[in-house]
Image (cartoon, coloured by chain):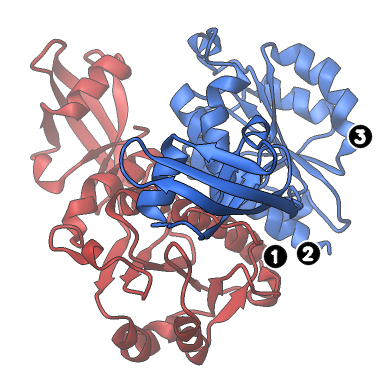
Chain colours: A red, B blue
Amino acid sequence: MNLIILQRHEVIDHTARLTDNRAKHIIRVLHCVVGDRIKVGVLHDRIGFGTITALQPKYPFMVEMTVTHDSPPPPKVPLDIVLALPRPIMLRRILSQVTALGVGKVHIVNAARVEKSFWQAGLVDEDAYMAYVISGLEQAIDTIPPKIFFHRKFKPFVEDYLPGIADHYHYLVYAHPSSARGVHLCIGPAQGKVLVAVGPEGGWLDYELDKFEEQGFCGFAMGARILKVDTAVVNIHGMIMAELEHCR
Amino acid sequence: MNLIILQRHEVIDHTARLTDNRAKHIIRVLHCVVGDRIKVGVLHDRIGFGTITALQPKYPFMVEMTVTHDSPPPPKVPLDIVLALPRPIMLRRILSQVTALGVGKVHIVNAARVEKSFWQAGLVDEDAYMAYVISGLEQAIDTIPPKIFFHRKFKPFVEDYLPGIADHYHYLVYAHPSSARGVHLCIGPAQGKVLVAVGPEGGWLDYELDKFEEQGFCGFAMGARILKVDTAVVNIHGMIMAELEHCR
């Protein structure tokens, strides 16, 4: 935790009182004592400091602090993601990492190679992943969770929903092992926002890629090696960020 | 597993007999029957196919196959890594991912912010991580593990060892949140091999960065967000690969 995240309702008259894992972390990992100042942020709000006014250093842990939060969170990166729904454990890891990486929006969609059972109730709910999103925010010192959208049907997403958001983006791209195009042929020379589509284990079907291409998506190569989806997402983020840097 | 990996000693007269998790995987996940052909590779050797000649579909699982392996493994990427020793669970994840990403050499070094306990016997041994390396090879369809080196002392590594390998590389770089330089100012326009140094949680000390700079390392920015080391390594790999693509 590089940042202690508070919920808005936890801050009353500039004071917060913690009795959960955050209190334990402040005491056992940060080794704080009364008077210490630690970095705190309010979820969906600003970042600042908490000055510890009281604490209970043994179980049950308790920390009380006065909170000032007046710094804006860091900006999001100009990259949003369309992601074929992965298995839940993988989605958790990905959401934590893309949150830390500053991605603003994640559209989770169906695809032919997505296992139907992944769409079960309880798994496709923003709240089910909030703990992982918050761990990404704590890691990267941010307070604004990415917006997560679930789209249960591929065709309506691509044909009806995508055209409605496409004009927010300068570049629509997807990564594909068999593509011959380098990423710099899809992105650049102008600066602008990128939407990247990342397929399921086993990849998008040709039919699905055709649908993306019809919407103006440009496919770029990312080497012949088959990667796990979490590795692929983080790696592609790096590729696109390096590419956008050339456009500055 | 996109590839079943065999040890050299397991292949006798073009025949292999498996009774462990690989046999279970072939039967329970790949649903193979006698006569099926599956992708196999021999560790440190070539890639090919196994044709199943016999199997025991219930516990204790057993698969027998005749093996032909005549395709070369994919080339390594032109990127090696110097990595400050992370905690063991993190190192496992990183080695699995950089293996899948095709990194050829990983130099694991000490740094001021590395916890001393991480250097305990048993933790800094290539064999302790072989299972994770192999899972990376299985993922990316490769048979050549990266070479892993452990350097217990920072100063001898940088001052004595690094100069001996530095001329294998065209670019020596490190990523640093506070750097103002874009990655394209460190890498390009010529094609060539890259060695990148990735720091510990909390980053390299200024002293350590000075030492890298003395050896000719160029520091590039990767945004102000603090990332976990595994996220950082995979992200930096993507940035550098995108950059090298410009040099082709």
Instruction: Name which residue type carries label 2.
Output: His
* Amino acid type, mark 1: His
Foreground residue among A153 and B198: A153
- The residue indicated by pointer 2 is B246
Of residues A14 and A219, the one nearer the viewer is: A219
Residue A197, image x, y percentages: 46, 71
The image position of residue B40, as x and y in percent, is 60, 49
- The x and y percentages for residue B31 are 38, 57
Residue A191 percent location from the top left of the image: 61, 73
Marker disc for residue B167: 3
**Which marked residue is nearer to the observer: mark 2 or mark 1?**
2
Residue matched to label 1 = A246
What is the chain letter for disc 2? B
Question: Are the residues under marks 1 and 3 on the same chain?
Answer: no
- Have a look at marks 2 and 3 and say if they share a chain: yes
Label 1 resides on the chain identified as A
